[in-house]
Image (cartoon, rainbow, N blue to C red):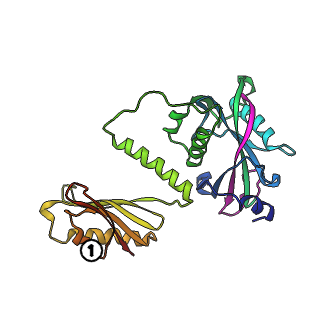
Amino acid sequence: MDRDLAAFLEPRPVNFSQQVIWRGGQHRLRLRVYITADTPPDAFVLAGRALVIDGARVLVVRNPDGEHVLPGGRREPGEAAIDAVHREVVEETGWSISRPTAFGVLHLHYETPEPVDVGRVIYPDFLWHVFVARPRTFDATARQADDYELDATFRDIAEVLERPLDPFQRFLLEAVARTDGPWVTDPTGDFAIEEPSSADIGFLEDRLYEFNVAATGVGGGLSLAVFLRDESKTIVAGAAGHTWGETCELRQIWVAEPSRGRGLGRRLIAEAEAEAVRRGCRQLVLTTHSFQAPEFYRNLGFEVVAEVPDYPRGHSQLVLRKLL
């Protein structure tokens, strides 16, 4: 990496990281997000982009590939990043903006050979300078008609965060929403006790995973499940969980009562363990209760590393680990 670029990036924490794929897999890049108001080295800034915030709403741009919240684009020769943001946002959306404030820097590193079909390239490392701005006026005639950007509308930030969005853009939008500024609003309504749907639980797990990746810089989490089914495709035995950060966690393990005592549980754990090892895991963790099968797991090489007494009353919850 260039010395000047390294001098800017290395002292700063990486707040989020993901791989991005462009042009159907032709170009693979590692993207890292830095939340900072500092000005990056100009020679590496390829583009300027902005989250356009209007109170509790954000400007969402729709194109054939989906939706995004970072209108903007490449700098023209001699153009500053902030000027590129002003020009590109109005050309893409018809909205002029006011008071763009530096909010972050995206560092993109090519993991594939230098492209020859994408216009001006800074290879292998380049930056996007990200701003937060307010909308000013809308002029439909200022928008450049093309076959890619279809439309742009303001939507509630809470609604946008519930829709499919590129993970790094979701992270940036959530970071802006947490920042003390005119776009921050208190949620309305009261808390409600509900019977959650599987989609509700999945939503919470996805958000927690995104936070965990942002906080640790460790990604690559994958679901893991092993099932044994009978002739009618009914599950007879199964285990489910995930692998992340060189650890496999099994959250559900079950064998149908008529099939217990036949070694299915041992085979089930062995299959999950073998897959965890293939994925580079160094340990397997799970929880059980004292009235379930702690001796079964001890015989498989697990050790109790934590105990919660009286859960449920008169019993204990056990956290077990096996080094792989």
| 238 or 111: nearer the viewer | 238
Q: Residue furthest right?
A: 78
How many labels sit on residues? 1
The C terminus sits in image quarter: bottom left
Residue 207: x and y, percent? 48, 47
Residue 233 shows in the view: yes
Residue at the (42%, 49%) spot, across then down? 205
Identified by mark 1, the residue type is Arg
Give the left or right position of residue 238, taking residue 211 as reference.
left
Residue position marked by numbered label 1 in the rendering: 298
- Is 231 placed above or below 79 here? below
Residue 227 x %, y %: 28, 61
Residue 27, position in %: x, y?
64, 57
Location of residue 142 (image quadrant): top right
The stretch of residues the image draws in magenta is 95-122
Q: Is residue 94 visible?
A: no
Question: Measured along the vertical axis of the image, is residue 312 above or below residue 249?
Answer: above
5 vs 290, left or right, is: right
Camera-side residue of 6 and 177? 177
Q: Residue furthest left?
A: 258
Image position of 163 with respect to 57: above or below: below
Q: Identify the image quadrant of the N terminus.
A: bottom right
Instruction: Judge left or right: residue 17 versus residue 294.
Output: right
Which element carries disc 1, helix, strand or loop?
helix
Residue 133 place in picture, x, y as percent: 70, 34
Q: Does residue 263 show up magenta in the picture?
A: no
Q: Is residue 121 a member of the stretch shown in magenta?
A: yes
Label 1 Cα neighbours within 10 Å, binned few <14 / some 14-19 / many ≥20: some
**Residue shown at the point (64%, 55%) measured from the top left:** 32
| Residue toward you, 253 or 75 | 253
